[in-house]
Amino acid sequence: MNRRLMFILLLGVSFFTGAVQAKMAVIHDVLGRKVEVDLPAQRVILGFYAEDYMAIGTEKSFDKVVGLSRDTWEGWRPASWHLYTNYRPSLKDIPDVGEVEAQTFSVEKVISLKPSVIVLAAWQYQGLGMDAKYLESTGIPIVVVDYNAQTLERHIKSTQIIGQLTGQEKRAEKIADEYKQTIETTLQRIEAAKLPKPRTYVEFGNKGPSEYSFTYGKNMWGAVITMMDGENIAAPFVEWWGPMNPEQVLASKPEVVFLAGTESGAKGDAVVMGQGIDRALAESRLAGYTKRPGWAQMPAVKNNRVYGIYQGASRTILDASMVQFIAKSLYPSLFEDVNPEQEYLDFYQKYLPVTPTGTFTAQLTE
């Protein structure tokens, strides 16, 4: 090999090495941690927020997903999983790394997949504890995002982070700006009206009317109710989530009640909402809750202000429409021109490759 050719090859290697090094970036995650990541991420393990990752990073971002905490999608939202896997069967081929809450998350499986980054929800990172530290000690960066807090700040930050990871910064900023505008304009109407705060109760209706399931204090639906200027009756009694004493619920005399549901309760008497759920079925399940002892005298029941809301549409950048629904339910006269369920479907049309059908919001009218 002559010297000229050798020089060209060496120059090429030098250029390529520089290009690889130039991809290294520092991401400031939602916990304020500085994480060095090679961008755009090439081998990703997703712990949660799969729809967010696809909406922000585009469908092509899943070409780089090498591991998935599958139960947070298939197990928690089976109808959504079927909707996506019918469209893109290759999702089923992504290795399952287990689920943190069920204590099936496998550190060994994660390491074997040789990820360039692990993307976890804040609750997953905290739940893994020393296992997360061990993974980081092996040189695998962990980036933490958080839509569970249901705060504008963390929703925006998490969206920007996913944009960085997928090389879709402009798309992320567009989605984040639209979310921010929806939240801020909704709040502006409420603040300008200066109406009394309606006493509000929310319950995850996964256990049926015979047993009170958990409600929310500072996070998820509880945080949304507070943000939309409702009076969350659970706030003094439940810090994050947990059941509320039935007698205390009645004593608080809620004027508005939200019952959250998913598709998984279809076989029993739980609240059912979501993909493929018939509206008549959803409303009949809501009606079952009004037969609870004492509920007939509840202001919310007397005034037909009992609402169904899709649990699967919380903890996500898609939840702007659910925030609108809660705001409209709390203050109907202020949002007569807003159709939250259509806004939810419109997001899919703009940013996701599938088209959901079913019941995502409901009101019991009789």
Image (spheres, helix red, strand yellow):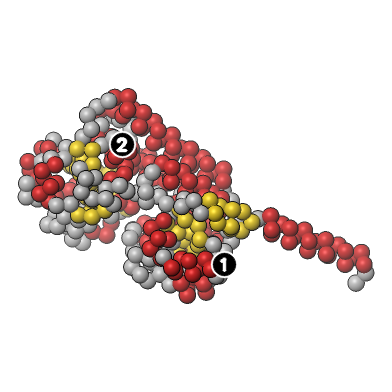
**Can residue 3 be spotted in the picture?**
yes
- In the rendered structure, the answer to whether residue 120 lies left or right of residue 215 reads right
Q: Amino acid at mark 1?
A: Gly
Location of residue 255 in the rendering, given as x and y in whole percent from the top left corner: 16, 37
Instruction: Tell me the quarter of the image containing the C terminus.
Output: top left
User: Residue placed at 40% from the left, 33% from the top?
Assistant: 184
**Can residue 66 be spotted in the picture?**
no
Q: Residues within 10 Å of mark 2 (few under 14, many from 20)?
A: many
SS for callout 2: loop
Q: Nearer the viewer, mark 2 or mark 1?
A: 1
Tell me how far mark 2 sits from mark 1, CA to CA: 42 Å
Instruction: Tell me the quarter of the image containing the N terminus.
Output: bottom right
Looking at the image, is 267 positioned above or below residue 30?
A: below
Q: Amino acid at mark 2?
A: Met
| Residue identified by numbered label 2 | 228
Location of residue 315 in the rendering, given as x and y in whole percent from the top left corner: 37, 50
Q: Tell me where residue 225 sits by quadrant.
A: top left
SS for callout 1: loop
Q: Earlier in the sequence, mark 2 or mark 1?
A: 1
Q: Tell me where residue 8 sits by quadrant.
A: bottom right
Q: Are marks 2 and 1 in contact (CB under 8 Å)?
A: no
Location of residue 28 in the rendering, given as x and y in whole percent from the top left corner: 53, 51
User: Residue placed at 20% from the left, 48% from the top?
Assistant: 237
| Residue identified by numbered label 1 | 139
**Viewer-proximal residue, 172 or 79?**
172
